[in-house]
Image (cartoon, rainbow, N blue to C red):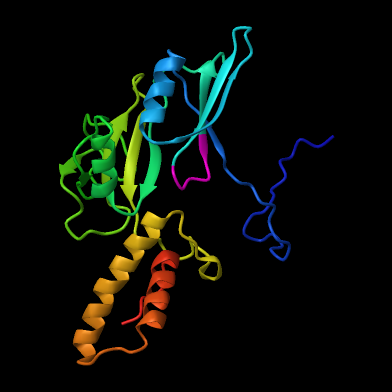
Amino acid sequence: MSSKPVRINDATSDRKAAPVDMKFEIVVIPVSDVDRAKEFYGRLGWRLDADYDSGKDFRVFQFTPPGSGCSVIFGKNVTAAAPGSAAGLYLIVSDIEAARKELLDRGVEISEVFHGAADVYTGTDEPYLFGRIRVNGPDPEHRSYRSFASFGDPDGNGWLFQELTMRLPGRIDPATTTFASANDLASALRRAETAHGQHEKRTGQRDENWPDWYAAYMVAEQAGTELPT
């Protein structure tokens, strides 16, 4: 039998067949005290999907953040990983200040909003996607993907809010634009309203067809394609 590795789905592969859906739905996080963890994640306002106790030294919880297609699981004898060893768990939000305030209102300790120091990747701060040097305040240009806030659960598992208002090109199919929650939709409408106001200033007249303009703007923003002007 040949031991030569076989390459599958590389750049030269036949792309005519539709790929098989692979939906990422579960992350297992290690905790030391399951009841304490249950109280913490419930306090975040996350939906409790499961609380199963076998009565035989096994227990599992499942929580889902609002608007998320992915859930977290933790429990007793669920994973051999060290409690608190999960880091860099991302929660995508459309308004980072509002998301941070909600956690503070729920009594959860969370960092100030920060952004990265260009391409500097050295330092002692908790690692995150754009580097390890944190600069206080949101991204000065309020660019999508660039503003963060961090918090941890009682064991030290690390979470990051990342503000995302417009995805990079190719990340979303514009034919299937969706919004995860009413809050996300409202935020998109507010951004479209602001941009449309600038559009009317440029044209010097009221746009009677503003619903279509809003719709085109919101779809393009989410898909990362060129925005209407």
Q: What stretch is highlighted in magenta?
A: 66-71
Q: Is residue 166 visible?
A: no
Q: Please report the residue visible at 50 percent of the width from the left and 65 percent of the height from the top.
A: 177
Specify the farthest residue to the right.
Answer: 1
Q: Where is residue 32 in the image (x, y as percent from the top left)?
A: 43, 13
Residue 13 relative to residue 208: left or right? right
Q: Is residue 183 left or right of residue 204?
A: right
Q: Is residue 175 above or below residue 11?
A: below
Residue sitting at x 62%, y 8%: 55
Q: Position of residue 126 (x, y in %)?
A: 27, 31
- Tell me residue 9's x, y (percent): 67, 53
* Residue 69 belongs to the span the image colors magenta: yes
Q: In which quarter of the image is the C terminus?
A: bottom left
Image point 38% across, 48% down: which residue? Answer: 92
- Number of labels in the image equals 0
Q: For residue 216: magenta?
A: no
Tell me which residue sits at (42%, 77%) in the image.
216
